Amino acid sequence: MKAFVMPVLGTGILLGVVVALGALTITQMFAPERTVVQFASQKTNIASVQNANTSTAPDLPKRAAVYFEAISERPIFAPTRRPAVETVEEIAVIEPEVVPEPVEIKPSLPPNIKLHGISGDRENLSALLSIEGGSPDWAPVGTLFGNWKLTDVGADWVLLKSGDAFHRVELYQ
């Protein structure tokens, strides 16, 4: 029985302390603070509020008195609050940008390519090509020859592309 009573008693005390601290915290959080309305409701003289050195309200901070003085000297809705400032608007002239007309780049003549053979599987074909009568080299799809790109390899042909122009080279040319 003693083993059951002690944990229940300890838990109850701990729970009571937590509830008390929570209630204390909540009352402190929502406690009313002194506001401007409360300062105004006190029987203070406006002249004493304006003069921070001779203030009769001991709770009124000096900074608040300075703010009150500045506000009372310059009323917000008075037409003479601030003199009107004349503003001169400058109109900026925006000159349009001169855009040069696009120049069409004509593809160069295709290089003198000779197709010697094709190797690889259907997805990874390579072509054995020689340029201008040089020694042949294997070229996969995507190889560049100047402005011309090897775009496709068939069973007995290759296709080169430059811009919108195409050049097909056959195996037995």
Image (cartoon, grey):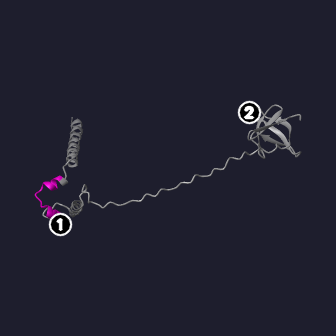
- The image quadrant of residue 79 is bottom left
Left of 98 or right of it: where is 117? right
Q: Are marks 1 and 2 in contact (CB under 8 Å)?
A: no
Q: What is the three-letter code of the residue carrying label 2?
A: Glu
Q: Earlier in the sequence, mark 1 or mark 2?
A: 1
Pick the residue in front: 14 or 120: 120
Query: Does 60 appear above or below 101?
Result: below
Which quadrant of the figure contains the C terminus? top right
Up the image or down, 39 lies above or below 3; here it is: below
| Depicted 114 relative to depicted 77: above or below | above
Q: Is residue 81 left or right of residue 137?
A: left
Q: Classify mark 1: residues with Cα within 10 Å, few (<14), some (14-19) or many (20+).
A: some
On the image, the x and y values in percent for residue 32 come to 18, 49
Q: CA distance from mark 1 to mark 2?
A: 92 Å
- Mark 2 sits on what residue? 123
| Residue 45 x %, y % | 12, 61
Residue holding disc 1: 51
Residue 77 on the magenta span: no
Where disc 2 sits, the SS reads loop
The kind of secondary structure the magenta stretch mainly shows is helix
Which residues make up the magenta segment? Answer: 37-50
Give me the residue at 19% from left, 54% from top. Answer: 36
Residue 121 place in picture, x, y as percent = 77, 32
